[in-house]
């Protein structure tokens, strides 16, 4: 049986619990305020919004009736896939199941608290990232662990970079796409934190929670499918030499994480569309003629490696945000002021760009850490314990795969950056931990970098807040 840690992971101190509680309350309040468009109305619905979250409420009502279709003409939801005259959305069931829980509590099917769901997702995502950071810190040998003061620094810096200073601010919009993305991010990060806990002490309960979170993630957004498969396979491989009862449990739960999330998501797709992916030939959107031109320009293919270079170039460009003289100071430059980048074989006729920001403007520190950490590990500048290295490798691979679907599609949008958040979260957690560990060893450079990171979160908060304020007035 593998011995994975030298001593039990330290529990959170009272000071740490208080710090985390304050941080999460602030994050929940900020996200709720943003998602309700500064009204704090739990059922806020943006006027004239064609892609509103009432879809999830209607899908919940259909589920209670044993159906998966959503009324199309009556409720004016104008983007769906038609089968036998019925409208089916490609969004998962997780947001609708949350509504059913609300129906049971309130006794009314009129309840549609999308701002609260958004705030819940953002808060859970930040909590999971903090828990992951503490788990990584706790995997150090007993004598090398961070001091109590540095553990607090770790909590605060991770919270600043991934909370107010991260894309959770921009994603806090009560719109149908945003809710699916933020729930996926939250559930996937919970699964990551639980798998890291399991790697550290091999308690099966963590894998059970990871399984539930993985099912929620894949049934919120399909781009979580590949990450959950990788997580499950990783658990199987890491437990293959363990012949104990815990090892057998881990093997079974690893297989469940590999199979159940993807089979449940694809099974729902099949029940809706009689296919494992939506068929564009049955698509009914807001502009069918423009959509058909996109299909024709790409030879009938709207998903594949042909889009990858163009997507990556646009999502990494440093000029995607413009600076304005009036509040909120920052707005999208692409495509209004700066044209999108097109890399062969993609042409302007074959790309659908909405308002597009980039990782370099919305989460620059997280991006830098995500790129730097694996490079520093490979060249031997920093060293991780076996538990940390296993966690970083497995979670990094799973998180990187989350973005694979987004960089192979015909559309560009700032909201799609949400699919990069799991990867940036893993990079940020390990990067901040390594810097704090170096700072604890007396490195002045590390201390300066940590201070600059804290300051940068204020700037990225303003950037993402500006994009949020602009985008909240844009349909979709």
Image (cartoon, grey):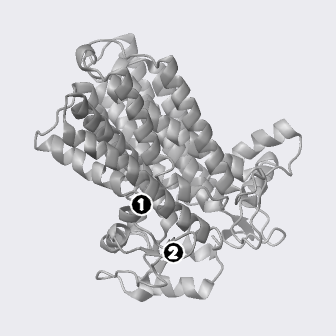
Q: CA distance from mark 1 to mark 2?
A: 19 Å
Q: Residues within 10 Å of mark 2 (few under 14, many from 20)?
A: many
Tell me which corner region of the image, top left, top right, bottom left or bottom right, holds residue 73.
Answer: bottom right
Q: Looking at the figure, which quarter contains the C terminus?
A: bottom right
Q: Report the side of 458 relative to 18 (left or right).
A: left
**Vertical order, 318 against 171 (above or below):** below
Tell me which corner region of the image, top left, top right, bottom left or bottom right, holds residue 278.
Answer: bottom right
Tell me which corner region of the image, top left, top right, bottom left or bottom right, holds residue 194.
Answer: top left
Q: Position of residue 103 (x, y in %)?
A: 82, 42
Looking at the rendered structure, which numbered label has been put on residue 405?
A: 1
Decide if residue 52 is in sight here. yes
Pointer 1 or 2: first along the chain? 2
Q: Which residue position is annotated with label 2? A: 355
Q: Looking at the figure, which quarter contains the N terminus?
A: top left
Identity of the residue drawn at 40% across and 40% down:
157
Q: Residues within 10 Å of mark 1 (few under 14, many from 20)?
A: some
Identity of the residue drawn at 35% across and 80% down:
341
């Amino acid at each position: 049986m593998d011995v994975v840690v030298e001593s039990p992971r330290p529990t959170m101190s009272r000071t740490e619990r208080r710090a985390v509680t304050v941080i999460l309350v602030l994050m929940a309040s900020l996200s709720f305020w943003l998602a309700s468009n500064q009204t704090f109305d739990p059922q806020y619905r943006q006027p004239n919004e064609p892609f509103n979250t009432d879809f999830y409420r209607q899908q919940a009502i259909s589920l209670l009736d044993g159906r998966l279709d959503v009324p199309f003409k009556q409720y004016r939801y104008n983007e769906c896939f038609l089968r036998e005259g019925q409208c089916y959305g490609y969004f998962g069931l997780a947001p609708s199941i949350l509504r059913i829980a609300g129906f049971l509590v309130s006794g009314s099917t009129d309840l549609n608290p999308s701002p609260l769901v958004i705030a819940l997702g953002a808060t859970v995502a930040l909590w999971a990232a903090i828990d992951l950071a503490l788990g990584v810190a706790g995997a150090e040998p007993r004598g090398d662990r961070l001091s109590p003061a540095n553990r607090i620094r770790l909590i605060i810096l991770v919270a600043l970079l991934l909370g107010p200073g991260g894309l959770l601010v921009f994603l806090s919009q009560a719109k149908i796409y945003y809710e699916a993305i933020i729930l996926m991010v939250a559930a996937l990060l919970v699964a990551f934190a639980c798998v890291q806990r399991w790697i550290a002490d091999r308690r099966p309960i963590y894998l059970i929670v990871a399984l539930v979170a993985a099912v929620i993630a894949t049934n919120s957004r399909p781009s979580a499918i590949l990450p959950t498969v990788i997580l499950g396979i990783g658990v199987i491989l890491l437990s293959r030499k363990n012949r104990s009862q815990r090892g057998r449990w881990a093997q079974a739960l690893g297989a469940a994480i590999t199979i159940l999330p993807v089979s449940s998501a694809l099974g729902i797709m099949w029940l809706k569309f009689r296919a494992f992916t939506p068929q564009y030939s049955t698509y009914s959107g807001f502009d069918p003629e423009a959509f058909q031109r996109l299909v024709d320009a790409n030879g009938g293919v709207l998903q594949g490696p042909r889009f990858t270079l163009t997507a990556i170039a646009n999502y990494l460009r440093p000029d995607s945000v413009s600076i304005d003289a009036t509040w909120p100071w920052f707005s999208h430059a692409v495509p209004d002021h700066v044209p999108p980048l097109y890399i062969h074989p993609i042409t302007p006729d074959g790309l659908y760009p909405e308002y597009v920001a980039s990782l370099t403007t919305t989460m620059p520190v997280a991006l830098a850490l995500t790129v730097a950490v694996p490079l520093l590990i490979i060249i031997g500048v920093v060293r991780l314990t076996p538990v940390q290295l296993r966690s970083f490798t497995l979670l990094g691979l799973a998180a990187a795969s989350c973005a694979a679907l987004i960089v192979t599609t015909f559309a560009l949008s700032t909201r799609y950056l949400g699919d990069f958040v799991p990867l940036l979260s893993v990079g940020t957690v390990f990067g901040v931990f390594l810097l704090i560990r170096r700072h604890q060893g007396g490195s002045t450079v590390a201390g300066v970098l940590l201070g600059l990171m804290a300051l940068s979160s204020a700037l990225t908060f303003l950037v993402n807040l500006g994009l949020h304020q602009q985008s909240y007035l844009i349909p979709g």
